[in-house]
Image (cartoon, rainbow, N blue to C red):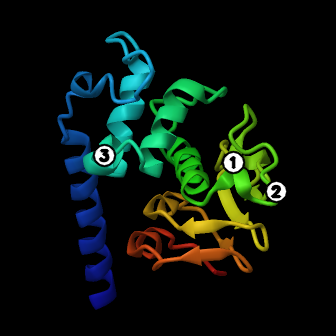
């Protein structure tokens, strides 16, 4: 009985948190020029404004407006440079996976990795080096990231909290790299399916 009550309280708090996030009234027009040396996001660019709003809600306004942050770089790349033009209005969870991986790449010196085949390309993140996704099935039409294996790959830096948006992740192997800092608590809070770290 205690377990059931705990589950219900947990579910209600998640619903409340999700509702609070949805009610965030962010005037994204105020931040339309956030990406330096780029044209401001126009009022009719619904995709650009949707990305900006979701990234602010998912990371934080302070990290997004900081021009040197990996969150800012990932957001600007996804708005302007991502050849896939992923739209968070279609599949928010799938968008957040790509955003998390781009943030990770930016914060761990991705261009200096031993291998980064197809990263930041037009290909699905499921095709990027070291990434494995679930197969589509009757219950899930969209493949989700289930494994990240970038072991012994010259990955350096700090793991950003956004890695916690890989909610279907079962395995995270970053062995043999030069990572520093502490593992984000958000990561452990969200990665409920993680079996191997």
- Horizontal side of 133 relative to 194 (left or right) equals right
Q: Which residue is mark 1?
A: 143
Q: Position of residue 125 (x, y in %)?
A: 70, 45
Which callout, 3 or 2, points at the residue further toward the start of the chain?
3
Name the residue that disc number 2 marks. 115
Tell me whether the residue at label 1 lies in contact with that at label 2, contact meaning CB atoms closer than 8 angstroms.
no
Residue at x-position 76% and y-position 49%:
128
Q: Is residue 188 left or right of residue 25?
A: right
Q: Is residue 6 above or below residue 139?
A: below
**Element under disc 1:** loop
Q: In front of the other: label 3 or label 2?
A: 2
Mark 2 residue element = loop
Q: Quadrant of residue 40?
A: top left
Q: Is residue 193 above or below residue 67?
A: below
* Lower position in the chain sequence, tag 1 or tag 3: 3
Q: Position of residue 16 (x, y in %)?
A: 21, 57
Which residue is nearer to you in this view: 183 or 109? 109
Place residue 4 in its image quadrant: bottom left
* Residue 60 to residue 31: above or below: below
Q: CA distance from mark 3 to mark 2?
A: 32 Å
Q: Residue at x 33, y 45 (%)?
A: 66
Q: Which residue is mark 3?
A: 57
Q: Earlier in the sequence, mark 1 or mark 2?
A: 2
Q: Within 10 Å of the Cα at label 2, are there few (<14), some (14-19), or many (20+) other Cα atoms? A: some
Q: From mark 1 to mark 3, how far is it between C-alphas?
A: 24 Å
């Amino acid at each position: 009985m205690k377990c059931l009550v705990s589950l219900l309280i947990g579910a209600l708090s998640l619903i409340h948190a999700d509702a609070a996030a949805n009610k965030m009234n962010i005037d994204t027009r105020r931040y339309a020029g956030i990406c330096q040396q780029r044209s401001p996001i126009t009022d009719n660019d619904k995709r650009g404004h949707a990305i900006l709003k979701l990234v602010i809600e998912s990371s934080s306004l302070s990290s997004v407006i900081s021009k040197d942050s990996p969150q800012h770089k990932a957001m600007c790349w996804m708005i302007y440079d991502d050849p896939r033009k992923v739209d968070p209005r279609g599949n928010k969870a799938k968008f957040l996976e790509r955003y998390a991986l781009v943030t990770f790449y930016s914060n761990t010196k991705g261009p200096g990795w031993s291998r980064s085949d197809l990263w930041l390309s037009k290909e699905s993140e499921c095709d990027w080096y070291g990434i494995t996704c679930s197969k589509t099935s009757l219950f899930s039409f969209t493949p989700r990231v289930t494994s990240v294996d970038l072991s012994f790959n010259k990955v350096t830096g700090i793991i950003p909290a956004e890695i916690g948006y890989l909610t279907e992740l079962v395995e995270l192997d970053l062995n043999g790299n030069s990572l520093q800092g502490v593992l984000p608590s958000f990561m452990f809070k969200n990665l409920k399916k993680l079996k191997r770290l």
